Amino acid sequence: MIVARLALGAAAAWAAYAWGAHLFAPGWVSRGPATQRRIALTFDDGPDPVWTERILDVLEREHARASFFLVGERAARAPDTVRRIAAAGHEIGSHGWSHRSLWLCGPRRTDDEIGRAQRYLSDAVGAPIRHFRPPWGMVNAAMFGALRRHDQRCVLWSIQPEGLRATPPARQVEHVLSHAHSGAIVDLHDAEGVPDAPDRLLVALPPMIAGLRRMGYELVTVGELLETEEARRVG
Ligand SMILES: [Zn+2]
């Protein structure tokens, strides 16, 4: 009985730490202001020496800029790709050091995941990293304090064309175009989380970009998308 009660107590504490943070904690954004016809494409899980390079080729051909939420330890293994992302004018954000879900991290590990990635990526880029995307969108109550200490903001998304299962390129394009809105943040992946996902994205990306532009959207980085709002918060 006591064991069952303790287990229940531990489960409730965990739920408050992980899920409660999701529901009640302030300080994260999933979209920019709706006042301007702007959309930010974002890529998680890289840099991948093969796939990220190919996505950068597409963005270069399309003259489009985007934001890359990099995994720290993967960035350390592909420094040339990190430099290329930054040199092309894309924004670099943090996706944690090891891509471990924050649901599995206590406060100390949470701070370590965020701080270590922030130090490495800021050094690599030569400017402080301002935006953090938690792996799988999983947050915990310790994350917000850690982000404040490291001067970062949690950025989720408002459109996600590919879930856990394979989605054909045409359906991804259709999903993004039919859900597009001013201030949207689109979540894409430039590494192989789902098998063959980057291959499908490479096919989907050009018509996705062309379609959004036809609808009058300007493609900007997350920093640019949130600029107006951040200026207002400071001012
Ligand atoms: Zn991820």
Image (cartoon, rainbow, N blue to C red):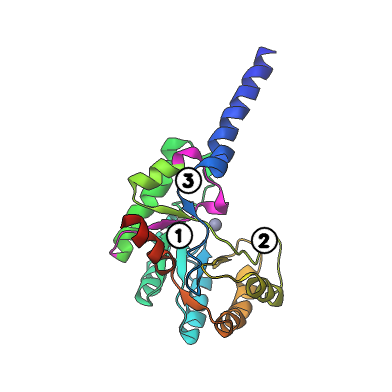
On residue 74, the disc is: 1
Location of ligand 1 given as a quarter of the image: bottom right
Give the percent coordinates (x, y) of residue 13.
57, 28
Query: Which kind of residue does numbered mark 2 sit on?
Result: Gly
Instruction: Find the distance from the CA under tag 2 to the CA under tag 1.
Output: 22 Å
Give the percent coordinates (x, y) of residue 11.
62, 29
Instruction: Find the distance from the CA under tag 2 to the CA under tag 3.
Output: 25 Å
Vertical comparison of 130 with 64: above or below: above
Categorize mark 2 by other alpha carbons within 10 Å: few (<14), some (14-19), many (20+). few
The answer to which quarter of the image holds residue 180 is bottom right
Residue named by callout 2: 163
Disc 1 on helix, strand or loop? helix
**Residue 64 among magenta residues:** no
Quadrant (top left, top right, bottom left, bottom right) of the N terminus = top right
Vertical comparison of 51 with 156: above or below: below
Give the percent coordinates (x, y) of residue 123.
29, 60
Disc 3 on helix, strand or loop? loop
Query: Which kind of residue does numbered mark 1 sit on?
Result: Arg
Evaluate if marks 1 and 3 touch, with contact meaning CB atoms under 8 Å apart.
Answer: no
Q: Residue at x 71, y 68 (%)?
A: 167
The answer to which quarter of the image holds residue 23 is top right
**Range of magenta residues:** 126-142
**Residue 128 among magenta residues:** yes
The numbered mark, 2 or 1, whose residue comes first in the sequence reads: 1
Categorize mark 1 by other alpha carbons within 10 Å: few (<14), some (14-19), many (20+). some
Residue named by callout 3: 26
